[in-house]
Amino acid sequence: MKLVVAAAVAVPLFLAAGAVVPAAMAAGPTASQLASKASADLKAAKTYRMSSITGSGKEAVSTKVTRGSNGCEISLTNDGSTVGFIQIGSTTWTGADGVWVAESTSQAGGALAYCNAHTVARFVPAISGLSLGRVTKVNGQRVQELKGYDVTMYVTTGAKPELVRYQLSGKGQDQGQFNFSGINVPVTVSPPSGNILGS
């Protein structure tokens, strides 16, 4: 009986003294909560870098995006051909093979959707039913793996989870990988150099 009483007194004192609580006793955020926080952070981002590849074979599309504080730069590669877009204010340049054509941003193609953080966040939604996986590293960053049926998300560990990778493991056009970096890190987009038409 004395041992039971002593233990009942010792445990609260042990915790009050700042002891580390074992993982089994500490309730951290769930996988869904981490995914939601990372998605909300991306939606609110002022700047970011994204690289992705979706689809497979000749249908695969590689995309690189730099969203800066003053504009956006995009390159799309498919079947060996690359098209670039640079948007700064009301002007967008479209380029291929070193030749750029200037036009009004309002007339530019749908590729500029990648310049909108809200739209990009819809490409990589925080789905339900995720479970906590391992803690690992992706692109040099320590991340928490969030596993789903055909989606795996990797978010940074710490108080403010940020999305680092979004992996789709489907077939055909339903497979792909989105990598993110530089969220809210200041970056400036520059106009194209080379042969510019329409300027």
Image (cartoon, rainbow, N blue to C red):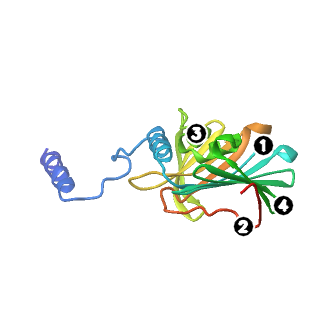
Name the residue that disc number 2 marks: 193
Provide the residue designation for mark 1. Answer: 55
**Is the Cβ of the residue at disc 3 closer than 8 Å to that at disc 4?**
no
- Circle 4 residue: 97
Query: Which amino acid, by three-letter code, is at mark 3?
Result: Thr
Check the image and report above or below for 136 versus 8.
below
In the rendered structure, which disc, 4 or 1, sits on the residue that comes first in sequence?
1
Q: Nearer the viewer, residue 52 or 48?
A: 48
User: Local crowd at mark 1 within 10 Å, few (<14), some, or many (≥20)?
Assistant: some
Mark 4 vs mark 2, CA separation in Å? 12 Å
Give the number of the mark in front: 3 or 4: 4
Q: Disc 2 vs disc 3: Cβ atoms closer than 8 Å?
A: no
Disc 4, SS: loop
Question: Could you give the CA–CA distance between mark 3 and mark 1, rounded to whole angstroms?
Answer: 19 Å
Kind of residue at disc 1: Gly
Query: In the rendered structure, are the residues bearing label 3 and label 1 in contact, judged by CB atoms less than 8 Å apart?
Result: no
Tag on residue 147?
Answer: none
Amino acid type assigned to the residue bearing label 2 in the image: Ser
Quadrant showing the C terminus: bottom right
Q: Position of residue 171 (x, y in %)?
A: 78, 38
The residue drawn where x is 84% and y is 60% is 97
Give the distance between the C-alpha atoms of the residues marked 4 and 1, in whole angstroms: 24 Å
- Relative image position of residue 108 (x, y in whole percent): 69, 43
Please name which of the two marks, 4 or 1, marks the residue nearer to the observer.
4
Which residue is the site of mark 3? Answer: 119
Front label number (4 vs 2): 2
Kind of element beneath mark 3: helix
Where's residue 44, x and y in %?
Answer: 46, 45
Q: Residues within 10 Å of mark 4 (few under 14, many from 20)?
A: few
Q: Earlier in the sequence, mark 2 or mark 1?
A: 1
Which amino acid, mark 4? Answer: Asp
Q: At numbered mark 2, what does the secondary structure look like: helix, strand or loop?
A: loop
